[in-house]
Image: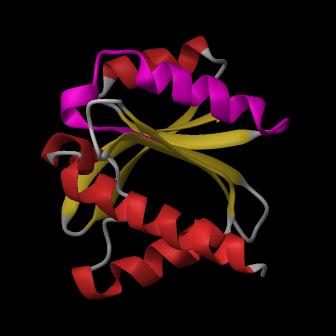
Amino acid sequence: MPENSSNENTKLISDIEDFLDNCGSECLKTFRYFRRCDQGDRTKLIAQRVENHIETVLITWQHSDSPVAYGHLDKCPEGKVWLGLCVADDAQGFGLGREMIKYLLSKYDGEINMTVDVDNAPSINLCKQYGFENVRTNVKTCDEHESIINYMRKR
C-alpha cells in the first residue's frame, strides 16, 4: 500500500473514532456497526471494517471539528453490499442522511442491503424514497439489547 494511502487510512480511522465519540447516544443506539468493541479494540475493528468498504464518507460542518455524519458501502465476503449510515444527534433534520444516501447510491450500481429499526419511521421513509423495499422484519439482539429491524433492499 502506498504511504499516502496508509496515512489517509489512519486519518479516516481517527475521524471515525472522533465521530463515534461525539455523535450522541440516540445515534449510537440504532447504529450497531461498530458497537461490539471496547475502547482497546475499536481502532483495530474500524481498520478491519474499512478494508471491506467500497466507499466511506464523513461529513463535517464548518463550525465543527468533529464529523457529524458517517456512511459506508461495505462489501461482505459472501458478496452482498450493505449501506450503513448514521447522523449525529444534534445534526439530524438538516438533510445530511438524504445527501449521504444519494451520494453512496451513486457509487455502486447493484443490489444494496441495509437494516433500519422499525420504530425509526423517518429513516424508513427516506430509504423508500430512494427505492429500498422492506424484505423482512426480524428481532436482532446486539449487546443484550433487542431490536426489531427491517431488512431493506434496493435492486
Say which quadrant the N terminus sits in.
Answer: bottom right
Residue 122 position, x and y percent, is 35, 18
> Is-magenta flag for residue 79?
no
Residue 89 position, x and y percent, is 20, 34
Tell me if residue 25 comes above or below residue 5 in the rendering.
above
Q: Residue at x 35, y 30 (%)?
A: 62
Tell me if residue 142 comes above or below residue 71 in the rendering.
below
Number of residue marks: 0
Q: Residue at x 43, y 24 (%)?
A: 96
Tell me if residue 5 comes above or below residue 38 in the rendering.
above
Say which quadrant the C terminus sits in.
Answer: top right
Give the image quarter of residue 137: top left
Give whichever of 115, 42 is nearer the camera. 42
> Is-magenta flag for residue 92?
yes
Q: Residue furthest right?
A: 109
**In this rendering, would 115 be left or right of 4?**
left
Q: How is the image coloured?
A: secondary structure
Is residue 33 visible to us here? Answer: no
Give whichever of 55, 3 is nearer the camera. 3
Residue 124 position, x and y percent, is 44, 23
Q: Which residues are magenta?
A: 85-110
Give whichever of 19, 137 is nearer the camera. 19
Q: Residue at x 19, y 30 (%)?
A: 90
Give the image quarter of residue 111: top right
Q: Residue at x 20, y 51 (%)?
A: 22
Q: Residue furthest bottom?
A: 40
Give the image quarter of residue 6: bottom right
Tell me if residue 44 comes above or below residue 87 in the rendering.
below
**In this rendering, would 151 be left or right of 131?**
left
Residue 31 position, x and y percent, is 34, 49
Is residue 106 visible to us here? Answer: yes
